[in-house]
Image (cartoon, grey):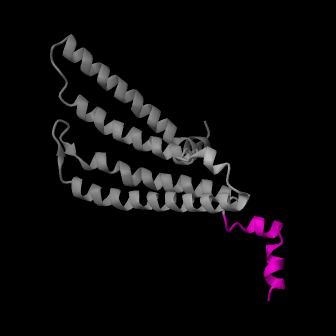
């Protein structure tokens, strides 16, 4: 696998790996409890910590593949101009939401890093750093997809469509 391919699929690779770890941790917990009658104290906390990371990675994958919530049957009935307006507004909302996740996630991490996960004896910050760090990855994925849409003319203010529609000529002629 090439480096570029690995980086392009980093969420899936890390998420799948963590999910496999969760599975084995929980199987070990079941075996330990049922067969040896001695539960692993740390297993639930570690599984929860990894699950948080897997869940937020899933959101990043959703941003990467544009799996935002959108009511298609209404969106498809709009005129092309209104579609561009709605698309632009949705993209602005997603962008602001990701920035908010980074800021709030970082503040939450700073507050929680002094607390300790009881069974694991590590900082709770390891659980809470997932939100701002993966949100930065989400922002990168969002910008990558937004650039493609911008170049394709899906935004209200896309220069490619303005050139195709001779809107620059209209602006010059109106002077």
x and y, in percent, of residue 29 in the image: 25, 21
Task: Give the residue displayed 26% in from the left and 58% down from the top.
Answer: 110
Position in image of residue 18 (x %, y %): 40, 33
Queried whether the magenta region covers residue 173, the answer comes back as yes
- Residue at the image point whose x is 80% and y is 77% from the top: 168
Q: Which residues are magenta?
A: 156-175
Up-down relation of residue 160 to residue 119 (above or below): below
14 magenta-colored: no
Q: Residue at x 40, y 38 (%)?
A: 54
Provide residue 98's location: percent of width, then percent of height.
Answer: 45, 57
Query: Residue at point 84% right, 78% down?
Result: 169
Q: Is residue 57 above or below residue 156?
A: above
Residue in the foreground of this view, choosing between 82 and 64: 82
Image position of 89 (left or right of 38): right
Q: Is residue 2 above or below residue 21?
A: below
Of residue 129 and residue 165, the one placed in the foreground of this image is: 165
The extreme bottom residue here reads 175
Place residue 7 in its image quadrant: top right
- Magenta part, dominant SS: helix
Q: Position of residue 123 (x, y in %)?
A: 22, 47
59 or 171: which is nearer to us?
Answer: 171
Residue 113 is left or right of residue 141, and the answer is left
Horizontal side of 56 relative to 117 (left or right) equals right
């Amino acid at each position: 696998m090439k480096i570029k391919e690995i980086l392009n699929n980093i969420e899936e690779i890390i998420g799948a790996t963590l999910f496999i770890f969760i599975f084995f941790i929980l199987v070990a917990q079941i075996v330990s409890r049922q067969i040896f009658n001695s539960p692993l104290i740390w297993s639930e906390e570690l599984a929860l910590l990894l699950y948080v990371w897997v869940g937020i990675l899933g959101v990043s994958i959703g941003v990467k593949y544009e799996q935002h919530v959108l009511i298609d049957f209404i969106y498809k009935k709009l005129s092309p101009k209104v579609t561009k307006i709605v698309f632009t507004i949705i993209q602005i909302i997603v962008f602001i939401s990701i920035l908010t996740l980074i800021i709030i996630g970082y503040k939450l991490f700073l507050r929680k890093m002094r607390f300790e996960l009881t069974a694991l004896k590590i900082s709770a910050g390891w659980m809470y750093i997932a939100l701002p760090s993966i949100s930065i990855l989400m922002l990168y994925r969002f910008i990558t997809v937004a650039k493609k849409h911008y170049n394709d003319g899906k935004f209200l203010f896309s220069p490619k469509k303005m050139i195709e529609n001779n809107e620059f000529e209209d602006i010059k002629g109106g002077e």
